[in-house]
Image (tube, coloured by chain):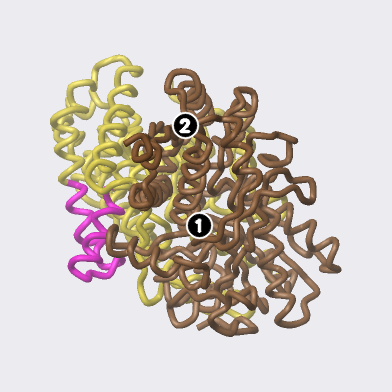
Amino acid sequence: MAVFLQSLLSGVLIGGVYALIGIGLTLIFGVMRVINFAQGELVMIGMYCTFFLFKLAGIDPFLSVVLTMPALFVVGAVLQRSLINRVLDALPQNQILLTIGLGLVLSNTAMLVFTSDYRILSTTYSSSSVGLGSIRLSTPLLYSFLITGAITAALYWFLARTDTGHAIRATAQDRDAAQLMGVNVRHMGVLAFGLGSALAGAAGALIAPIYYIYPQVGGAFTLKAFVVVVLGGMGSIVGATLGGVLIGMIESLSALYIASGMKELCVYVIFLLVLLLKPSGLLGKSRT
Amino acid sequence: MILALLLAASVRIGIINSVTGPEAPIGETLSNGYKLALEDLKKAGIEVEVVSEDDTGKPQIALSALEKLVTRDNVTGIVGPYSSSSANPTVKAAEKNKVPILIPTAAKEELTRMNYKYVFRIASPANGLAAAGLDATLGLGPAKKLAVVYENTDFGTSTAKTAKEYAATHGLQLVADEAYSKGSPDYRSTLTQVKSADPDVVFMVSYVADAILLMRQARELALSPRAFIGGGAGFSQPQFVAERDISEGILASTHWTKDSGWPGAKEFAERYQKRFNVDPPYHSACAYESLRIMAECAAKSNNDRDKTRACLHEGKWDGIMGPVKFVDYDGFQNQNKHPVLVTQVQQGKVVTVYPKENAVAKPIYPFKWK
């Protein structure tokens, strides 16, 4: 029982971070109908920012969230204005090519600048844990989860309670109708991409102390975020949150009960089953 | 005049290494070893003409590199490639072309088990790594239960396999056998499983980044066996050792250390450190000694491939890798019976603790988290 609970809780905690990357991706998709295949590379930039803030300025990785989020917001907004905006009305395959290309440019630039060496960020609490009966929770992972929760809650509040939040959701529901109601939809696109990138930056900052950092790290996260989003339902923020936690749990429990090397396989098998039985995802509405 | 020309012998040697691609960081440490070997050969009066080929970490490119070296560049002998997966097709082609090849580091056992006459290896095959680590640990205190944790790659699986075979023949009970796919941020489930089996000894095969993650998460979960042993690779590298909270007391098997007491090892390390500003890993020492031996044989046999092969087969050396002789044993052919060393991190430094004749410090046992 303790073994089961230990695995389950670890899975939920790591799932929180997956959810954060997924929420960014789903937000961008919801507002602009563009799947950002460079989301993982934005996470990678967030990780490097955090690493250097810690190494050069001694800023704690979890505190650096307040710096990496605005920085990545600006990066995202600039990318949207200069590149993504031009393909909003283009064919979906052209949009996909653009974001994949963007990801390649980002990761290869990072390789030129930072070299392909693995970097490890070590803090005083890197390998410490909190005891909870017979269960031990990783301190850095617990911090990540709490900050993820706070950011997600703030985002929900922003989207549900503020005028700008309403405008973003309106744009996501019906772009033309929102424009007719006087919403500046171009502006909302920049805002959504900026927010999505900021979330990727936050995820990068939260993953940096529990993982290792290298230029190609983004690819794995893009794929995971994509699965999280499709599982939860494209465009649904609650769905992405649920999808992230679910995938963390599946990984953890399948490593325990099936085999450590098989956990990815289990994730994708369950993913395929969900798509077969409910093609719009767990919380997605089917769109025409 | 003629005598002087004969003395300044000139030989043609091919080197296959991973200079670019994912293996490049380790490939570089081999390149550094080759550089120092060339300087020393020059001093000894052997002028070496090196033809270097980059396999970019890919077996098929290693293979075409070998064919180019043999046919177009007409080299006398070949040193390399670095990785087991690149070496695998290369040795077959070398045998077919009857050109001697000396493998510096690749550990896959089969490389010197295929009844080839032209294939030599200086480093110990994978089974030596596992056996030395477990021998050293069993010598320290009684152990009954063994857990094996390794990445599911060619190197990880083959090293872990030899550890499991060792357990079967030495009365150890295998209580956990966990192959993980590398690159995951979370190994806690795997380690929880291992912890619930309550092993006395945990044997791990991982590269440095995963080694750090695994040990961090093991500490979080308070997985506390009597000993952690790393089978080669990540567990004695500087980046791992620098993580003081998790590296202290970890045992690791390796092919070479600077304090092994082998002739010239210490001087080699000092020279390397001065030149490249970092401590040499075992790869550099293996590369250095391999090129030195190959060039020496090629010079003695006047660039004749068959005579070079005979020279490698019959020769005996005693340098920075300790005693080197290529012999047939336990189903291996032309395999150097290399004494594998076991190191331990003590007070943030890697020291040799096994075997006795090379040890500079007493091993700390049983293992305790800092």
Q: Position of residue B352 (x, y in %)?
A: 54, 74
Return the mark for residue B50: none
Which amino acid is tagged 2? Answer: Lys
**Subunit bearing disc 1:** B
Report whether residue A32 is seen. yes
- Is residue B327 or residue B345 the one in the foreground? B327
Magenta stretch: give its range.
A45-73
> Is A40 situated left or right of B157 in this image?
left
For the point 65% across and 55% down, the residue is A253
What residue would you read off at disc 2?
A285
Q: Colour of chain B?
A: brown
Report whether residue A8 is seen. no
SS under mark 1: helix
Return the mark for residue B210: 1
Picture mark count: 2
Which amino acid is tagged 1? Answer: Asp
Number of other residues with Cα within 10 Å of mark 2, as a class: few under 14, some 14 to 19, many 20 or more: few
SS under mark 2: loop
Is residue A108 a member of the stretch shown in magenta? no
For the point 82% across and 68% down, the residue is B172
